[in-house]
Amino acid sequence: MCRRFIIGLSLLWLLLVVAWSFMTTKEIKGLSEGSAFSVTNLTKRLHSQMLGNLWHKDELIDVNGGWTRILDKRMCNGALKLNNGYISRVMSRTYVKGAASRMNSLASLCRKIGVECLFVMSPSKIDVKKSLLPVGGPAEFSNDNADAFLKLLTDVDVVDTRKIISATADDVTRYYSKTDHHWNFEGAFKAFQTIAPKMLSMLGENADCANLQQLDEKNWDKVGLGRPFLGSVGRRTGCWFAGMDENVSYLLPRFDTELSIMIPRHQMFLHGIFRDTWIFRENLATPVSWQQDRGYSVYGHDFPEMFIYNSRAPVKKRILIIKDSFAIPVYAFLSTIFSEIVVFDLRHNVSVDVGNYIQSFKPHLIGVMYGSGVLREGPMFGFGDCKLKKTAIVKETRQLRIAAKPSMYNCATLTGNLKPGSHVSCSVRKIDITEGGARFATVALYERTRKKIIVAHYFEFGRGAPQTFCADVPNVDGCYQLVVFAGERGKTAGNSVVLHGVSLESLEKLTDE
Amino acid sequence: MLFTSLEFLFLFLPVTFGVYYLLPSWKGLKNYWLLFASLVFYAWGEPTFVFVMLLSIVFNYCAAVVISIFKDRLHIARLFLWLSILGNLSIIGLWKYANFITETIRAWFPALHGIVPQTSFVLPIGISFFTFQAMSYVIDVYRGTVGVQKNPFFLALYIALFPQLIAGPIVRYSTVCDQIMSRRTTWDLFSSGVMRFLVGFSKKMLLANLFAVTADKYFAARELSVCGAWLGAVAYTLQIFFDFSGYSDMAIGLGRMFGFRFLENFDYPYISKSITEFWRRWHMSLGSWFRDYLYFPLGGSRVSSKMRLVFNLSVVWFATGVWHGANWTFILWGVLYGVLIVVEKLTGLPKRIDRNMVSRAAGWFGTMFFVILGWVLFRSVNLASAKCYLGAMFGFGSCGFLDDKTIFEFGEIKVVLLFGLLASVPLLDMVKSRMNRHPVLQDCLHAIGGVVLILLFVVGVSYLSMNAHNPFIYFNF
């Protein structure tokens, strides 16, 4: 009897420790939620919850990688060990025709409105000659997909970074992390040294610009990450399969910089020198779990939208960059040259139609920077209808003042009754704060009946250049208006703001294109 | 639910154990709990099929009770026996074979398309196992070798007991009837069950699943070299053994943890020197089922003419093929073994093989050659792909003798292959038997064995943590 209770209680204890560690009470309650409840769905959800919250998952993945190494296998959980000991994902053949067609449409629209368009092909971790692949190993098509895609582009300027980053096996060893499918920061800088001059020449900048100090690596300091790093491929295999990346270093400029970075979706406003704005310190620290290692994201995450301003930029041009994760360090480097860069990552539900956006925002150049892993028709090439539209001025106001009030939501309406499905843009020549301590005003597309902010943007006080906010009004009935808050939403009390040269525009369809 | 799943290992099993060992033995409470747990186990993922199993339980319970009532009036009892056999075959026929039968009829007789609709029944997992267990119970009641179980819940427990429910071994009622009524779990039995479970878990996760990756690649390939085709076939040969025997080990181990002692199901079949010996060592519970309930009633080998013997063997092996699946590949696989065993019976080959070393080696090579060919038939999706694969094995493929892919795949699997080959022979058993004379060494071996098994369990769980390829072949039978 006594033994029975000991065994029973021990096993129940095991249950409590192990099984309960998989899920929080909230997650257990969440199992029965959802529209299509059934026993089958419940068991599937339970499985994914247990898998996601597995006890010591990091260590188990390490064990698995170590065991695979003992078995002398080169494939581990979808990752392939290359001939140089690095690990890479294996890419299957992709149907690239649709993506190339969408890229050609965007380039065609750019030509019509006088905007330069550049496609940057990010490199693959497999060298172009495929000498890093084991003989007889799995078929790998990243370079073939990239070649097929580039062949289909018509009248699009291209920088193919594979020619400098992954032309040979030695290039890959130098410019890639061992455990990450992205290039390392040195590789990204090397690409930047090619991409930036190309952009400058497309923008017609004079020859002096090609000798910019930003392009010389002597003007950048290498700073060590100070910890080992496990990249995105390494997180699938653990650290015992191919080891970790040691001696990873990132770059900081030696020259003066003054940047403002706005990420309204995350309510982030950063201002200061390169180190204080671009370096996301939380990603430098050793993570609690390797599954959360963000060593590659030293220069930021894959944010859906970023707005970067450089008041000391040598080139006063607006650049729109549409990108995947390869471009993260590259646009950080580019921001030291160009005065205004807007970055869209179309995987993350960007709030505007790209085709409309470039017509109202009017950038000088659009750079699409993609790796071979995304060259298929889908959200990454969702540039909208890419049709030429007419810009119509809705309203022009020479000056608009928002007086100081104790309200936390002190704001002024720029325009009301915006048509559902339309595209609006608002630009201000200058915006100043006359009372209070805020650093920026918030301009937002607001739906009055549901009291919901659809999308918001920041206008920085005191900037010497015009600032623009563009938005697509949802094609759903509602009472939409553009409003400006005298500061950060919820923190406007006591602020007084003056907007100079406010102009509201909308895009209208052309009857004959 | 799979034994090799996170839900089973870290949720279902601890709960089932915890409650089981806390419950008193009073009035079979433990049995009721085990039955409830078994139904949950079966219903996990696809709950509707639990009703098919409950239908089978109720039907066979009634049949056995009626047969026991009329045990003195043999012709009535026999009538109910045949009715119960017909009923069981109808259950399995409907869910397992209806699709194949209608598809074949429609393919052979296009004129019947309007009359014979194409059925699309979904196969309830483990239907062949629980139906055969239920049939054996009713037949044993008719024969008087076991008494009728009057408690329907206890009969349900026999049929639905989760360790052996979905992939065997096919447990006879006579083996477990006393254990259902009264059993005692000793610490030794429990710990031996845990060890056996870990052995099975390691076989499945660390050998079968890794062989499956290679086998799946080759059986899905359009172009094969000779060496590649053989590598794929050998990988599948080892996969199916470690998959099924691993599952049987886990079932036997779980049974012991709950106080049940199931009979062995495998005895190193790949060391067999003849096909007859192979089938004495492979899926022993199925082989003995067909022997006791089909082959012997037909007359077995004690028949007056050789033609009758050939007929009896043909029926048994045709049935064995059909039992494994509703596909011509399975039927042909069964027929192949039927032919081989008839040849061995008629020539007395198995007895002659044991004469000397050379004939034993030749016997082993010959046996493994046909076993591997048989598994190619078994694994192929249809006869056409089986033909292509077998052709590639004998040089009629499109990639020559040896290709780069095979060199790479061999490199990937070579260490696993070595472990697999070592685990297919009774090497450890030989070591253990040698150590019987040295108790200290034996204790050391047990301790080391325990530690190794725990480490292998951790490695196995690491595959689960990555949601790695985890197929289970005998689920479909």
Image (cartoon, grey):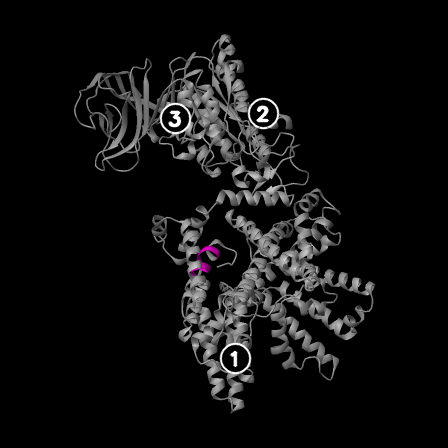
The subunit letter for the residue under badge 1 reads: B
Which stretch is magenta?
B9-15
The subunit letter for the residue under badge 3 reads: A
Q: Which residue is mark 3?
A: A306
Q: Residues within 10 Å of mark 3 (few under 14, many from 20)?
A: some
Label 2, secondary structure: give it.
Answer: helix
Label 3, secondary structure: give it.
Answer: strand
Q: Is residue A512 left or right of residue A245?
A: left
Q: Quadrant of residue B408?
A: top right
Query: Horizontal and vertical percent for residue B155?
Result: 47, 75
Query: Horizontal and vertical percent for residue B467?
Result: 51, 48
Query: Horizontal and vertical percent for residue B124?
Result: 49, 64
Query: Horizontal and vertical percent for residue B125?
Result: 51, 64
Q: In 3D space, how far apart are the residues under numbered discs 1 and 3 (Cα atoms)?
A: 74 Å
Question: Toward the viewer: B198 or B473?
Answer: B198
Q: Residue A409: within the magenta?
A: no
Question: Toward the viewer: A481 or A497?
Answer: A497
Q: In 3D space, how far apart are the residues under numbered discs 3 and 2 (Cα atoms)?
A: 26 Å
Q: Is residue A301 above or below residue B140?
A: above
Q: Are marks 1 and 3 in contact (CB under 8 Å)?
A: no
The amino acid at mark 1 is Val
Task: Tell me what residue is drawn at x 50 percent, y 58 percent.
Answer: B2
Q: Which residue is mark 1?
A: B138
The amino acid at mark 3 is Met
**Residue B477 appearing in the image:** no
Q: Residues within 10 Å of mark 1 (few under 14, many from 20)?
A: many
Q: Is residue B204 above or below residue A115?
A: below
Choose the circle earlier in sequence order: 3 or 2. 2
Q: Which residue is mark 2?
A: A165
